Amino acid sequence: MRLWWQDPFRMFQTNLREIDAGLDVESVLDYLEEFGADTWLLSVGGILSNYPTDLEFQTRNPYLAERPSGDLVGDAVKAAARRGIRVMGRMDFSKIDHRRAEAHPDWCFVGPTGARQVYNGLTSVCPSGDYYQVKLFEVLDEVLDRYPLDGFFCNWMSFNEVDYSRVYHGVCHCVACQERYDGPLPDDRDSPGYADWQRFSKDVLADLTGRIRDHLAARRPEAPLVLGDQADIVFHEANNAVGRRLWHHRTSESVSAAKTFRPTVPVLTNSVGFVDMPYRMASEDPHHFAQYLVQAIARGANPSTYIMGTPETTPYACLDVASRLTRFHRDHSEVYRDLVPAAQTLLVRSERSRAEFEGLYLALLQRHVPFDVLPEHRLADVDLSRYQVVVLPDLGPVDLGTYDGAVVATGTTTVPALPIRPLARYETEAEVRSLHLEGGVPVFGTFEVVEAPSDAEVALRALSRAPYGPPEKCHGHVLLDRPGMVKQGNVVLFPWTIGRAYREVGLSVHRDLFVDQVGGAVQTDLPEQVEIVVGRSAAGFVVHLLNRSGDTDQRFAPPVRIGPARLRVPAGVREVRALVAQERLQVSDGWVQVPEIGLFDVLVCV
């Protein structure tokens, strides 16, 4: 049986304050219908229950008294059903009030010093304790007994090392964690054993997620769980934050990582309409918000818009563009049905080498090489044979199993197919400074001095370092037998951080050296500011063209219109539709003329 969330859907989340319990349900539903949404994520239970709960450890929202029925959830579910709109329940079990915390101290987060974590009068709880492990399921049962909800989302289901103010509290030392963890618990990120604790915490949450999924499947199979990458629907929150460096491709990267791991599992990108939680009344810039939704749908995610309060109380400036893009997704739902990745290049992600990853990401994007992203720890879970090239950015030893396609590796990466002998490593700024490869290519970051196999092809030999000041002494570079590139069979290694060099300095020579070894670029005369994302759906071969000309320092500016331009389509394509331009494009000798592109366009090839 095909379940509702396996088809494209569009969500709107009203993250309600306690004072919003008297909202006009019909007015909100009118807004959602005009907006283009068919699913309403409504605050239901946990910290506050927006229904008359009878559970002793839950708190009824006192503002429910403003409703004649005394039941916001019941009113919403009935009214939405009359319109064919689904209602999903937002639950937040991360905190309890002071009275419950005093009665059940064993449920609470306990820091390394023995202190609880209290924020605005609410006490954080620990996923290892019985509030999550036992009481959560009692709440779900009470809700399911009363309302035919269409799914659930659990907010902030995590070990609360960091609070809303970004204050770091360390690792939980509650009794339940001590009983579950094998050995002494670390105190914080810098403690010995912290990596082991991270694996433990992920296992606890994965087990809990699985149990919630199983519980919902047994009680109400048509009600999915929205959570991490093991849930029925994978959740990604697209948001901004004051003080955080903007990575312009964060949404696209996150959705790609989820869809590459499990292509047929739906992803929900919940896009935050405000700038940051402390600035929740300030609208996100419309051009910034548009990127959340465009990047999401291009990679196959379902779009969602998230506001604080109700549309009446927080009429954010970004909601107009959000509505236009949501309606576009609605009007072309056949294009987004069963949309899965179709790139032939895979870029593996490791947070240990973030700058290297981002540099290679930008290089591929700008040279029009379509690619998918996969987290390093998922390598063994994906059939790599669907890719012609796998890119490994500074990962150390990597086992690709039986994969026999092409590999392009950088930095410290080693694979069995290319046995090299490490001799030394330059890794500090002082060690690398003045290091060049033949042809005047500068090295930044780290450089591995390696001995290549005798039958390997070597290139880009290093020049010895020499004085770099004063000018009168700037000479003495000697060509050495230290390769900057090694190739054997279908494996290429750049034994230095060529991606980091491009990310931090921006020389096109680094980008082009790398991409020329990867290959697979789409033939087009579109400029590098247009990102090309390819996929397959029920409608055919789908090409999203994203105009990135508005990417600028710490913001998204209005994109400059680009085109028209030529683009080669896959062999055998007879017809191409440009959905935004609303044109049918003539295919001539495998080429089409792409109309002028504003924010984006979508080509459907059949």
Image (tube, helix red, strand yellow):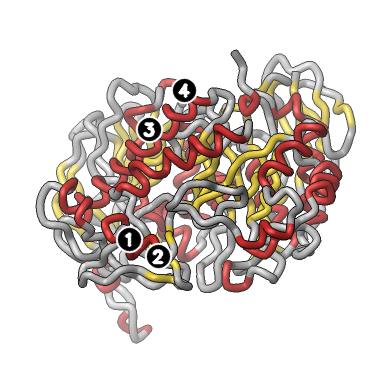
* Foreground: disc 4 or disc 3: 4
Could you tell me if the residues under marks 2 and 1 are in contact, i.e. CB atoms within 8 Å? yes
- Which quadrant is the N terminus positioned in? top right
The residue carrying mark 4 is: 218
Please indicate, yes or no, whether residue 190 appears anywhere in the rendered image. Answer: yes
Q: What amino acid type should be assigned to the residue bearing mark 3?
A: Arg
Could you tell me if the residues under marks 3 and 2 are in contact, i.e. CB atoms within 8 Å? no
The residue carrying mark 2 is: 99
Q: Secondary structure at mark 4?
A: helix
Left or right: 125 in relation to 260: left
Provide residue 71's location: percent of width, then percent of height: 67, 48
Neighbor class of circle 1 (other Cα within 10 Å; few <14, some 14-19, many 20+) is few
Label ID, residue 103: 1
Neighbor class of circle 4 (other Cα within 10 Å; few <14, some 14-19, many 20+) is few
Give the residue displayed 62% in from the left and 72% down from the top. Answer: 279
Label 3 and label 1: CA atoms lie apart by 26 Å
Neighbor class of circle 2 (other Cα within 10 Å; few <14, some 14-19, many 20+) is few
